[in-house]
Image (cartoon, rainbow, N blue to C red):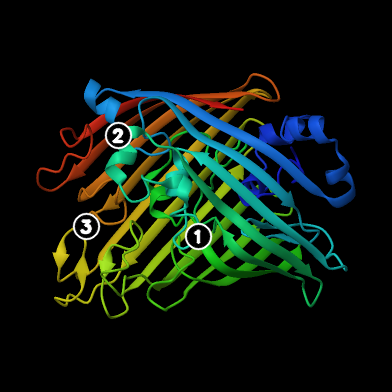
Amino acid sequence: MHNIKVKTLGAVLAAFATLNSHAAESPETGEGTLFRSLFGDTLEKDYGIQVSGLFDAAYSRNNRSTHDERQDGLSNLPVVGFADEGLEWGSLHLFVDKALKGDMVPRITPLPGPKPTEASFGFTFEANYGRNAQFARTQGWDMHWDVNSPGDDDLAKAQRDKQNFLAVPNIAATAYLPYGPGITAMAGVFGPARGYEIPPNIRAARNPFGSKSYAFVSEPGTVGGVLLGTRLYNGESGILGAELGVVQGWNNLRDNNDRKAMLGALRWRTPDMNTWIDYEFLVGDSQNDSRSDIQTPRGRVISEDGQFKQQHSLNGWHKFNERWSMGGEMVYGRQSGDGNASTVDIVTGPGFDGAHWWGANVVLTYQQRKDLSFSVRAEHFDDPDGYVLFPSSIARGAFNALTTGLRYDFNKYLSLRPELRYDWFNGDGDARPFGQGDARNQLTGTVETLV
C-alpha cells in the first residue's frame, strides 16, 4: 500500500499522504479483491477505475451508562466514532475512483517527481450505509432521502431504534491540467479533509483508533463546491502545495443564507515524504436566514444578518524511523454573533454574541512488526461556550482524553483495533457531559473490526 492504487477516494488517499511504516512495508492488501474476483480486472487495467468496499463494525461499552441507556443508543456520547454501546454496524462503504495522473492529490498532498505534461481526468465516489452515515449526510443532497426516514426528521426515534442511514459524502469530478506549475480541480460534493483525522476508518488512515478526537467533531464533514490546487515548489528543501476553493458552507449543497464559504490549505512535505505539515481553513458566514429553513447541527444560529464562522487547523506528521511515528494537530474556531435580539442560538436563545473553541492532540505510534502496531493519543479540547460539539454535547468547558490501543492485521482482508479510552471534563457549573448527564469522566472500551 505504498502508492495510491488501493483506493483513491479522498479518505483513502490520506493513507498515501501519511505513508506510515506499516503501509510502506505491506506487500499486499485485500482492498478491491471481491470486485475483481466477480468482474475481473479489466475496469482497473484498461480504464484506471478502482472499486472496493469497507465494512466497519465494533463492540463497545462504557462504565457510566445504565442498561436502559445502552438500549436507547448513543450512550457513549460525547465520545464519537462508535456512539452506541454493544455491537454497532458503523459503516459499509462502496468506493469507486479514477485517480488523476498529476503532481497533486486534491485535498491531500502535493507529490514529488516531475510535472506531468498531459491532462488527466477522473472522479471519486463513496456511498456509506450504517450508523455513522447519519452524520455524513449533506443538506440539499442526501439529508432527506426516503431511505433515511423517519430518523432524518425525528432524531430521538433514530436514537432509540439505532437507525442506519445512507449517505453519499463523495461524488465529484476531478481534473489535472498541465498549465503553469500544473492545476488540479475538483467539483461536486466531497469531504474537505480539514484537520488531522480524515474519514472513513480505512486500515491505514491517519487516525489509528475507532473513536474520534473532539477536534474531529469540530471539523466540517462535507462541502459542495469547487476546489483548485497547485504544486508551488518541488526541490531539495521540500514540496509545497496550495489549495483554494469556494463552497456552499458546512455540510451544505443547498445554501440557506445566499453567501458562499471559502476553504484553502498550504501543504509542505519533505522530499522523502517522511514529514509533512498542513495549514487548513474554512471561513464564511454560517447562519440560518429563516426560521422556516434551519439547517442543524452545523448551523445553530438564526439571523437575518451574516454571522461569520471560521475554522483553522495546523496539523502534521513525522516518521522517526521504521518503528516510531507521531502526528498532531492544533485547531481553533470561532462563530461570530452580533448580540442582537434577532440573532438567536437554537440552544441558548436570543442575543447570541458569539462562541469560540480550540484544541490540541497528539498521537504516537510504534510499529512492532508488519501486522502489529501500538498507539496512544492525548487530547485537550476547550469549548467554553458549549457550541461546536453540538449535538454530541452542549457542556461548557474543557474535554480531555487519553486513548491507547493496537492494530492487528489478521490477514490482508481483516484488521482488529481494540482500544481503551478515558475522558474527563473540567468546566464551570454543574455540567456533566458523560453518562447521560450524570458524570464528569468516562472509561470506554471498544473492539473495532475492519473488513
Q: Secondary structure at mark 3?
A: loop
Is tag 2's residue or tag 1's residue first in the polypeptide sequence? 1
Q: Is residue 418 visible?
A: yes
* Residue at the far top in the pictured view: 410
* Residue at the far left in the pictured view: 429
Is tag 3's residue or tag 1's residue first in the polypeptide sequence? 1
Is tag 3's residue or tag 2's residue first in the polypeptide sequence? 2
Is residue 345 placed above or below 399 in the rendered structure?
below
Marks 3 and 2, how far apart at CA: 28 Å
Pointer 2 residue: 160
Residue 95 position within the rendered picture, expressed as x and y whole percent measured from the top left? 66, 44
Quadrant location of the C terminus?
A: top right
- Residue closest to the eye, 39 or 11: 39
Pointer 1 residue: 141
Pointer 3 residue: 385
- Residue positioned 27% across, 42% down in the render: 156
Marks 3 and 1, how far apart at CA: 30 Å
- Residue closest to the eye, 420 or 351: 351
Asked whether, in this view, residue 350 is left or right of residue 69, the answer is: left
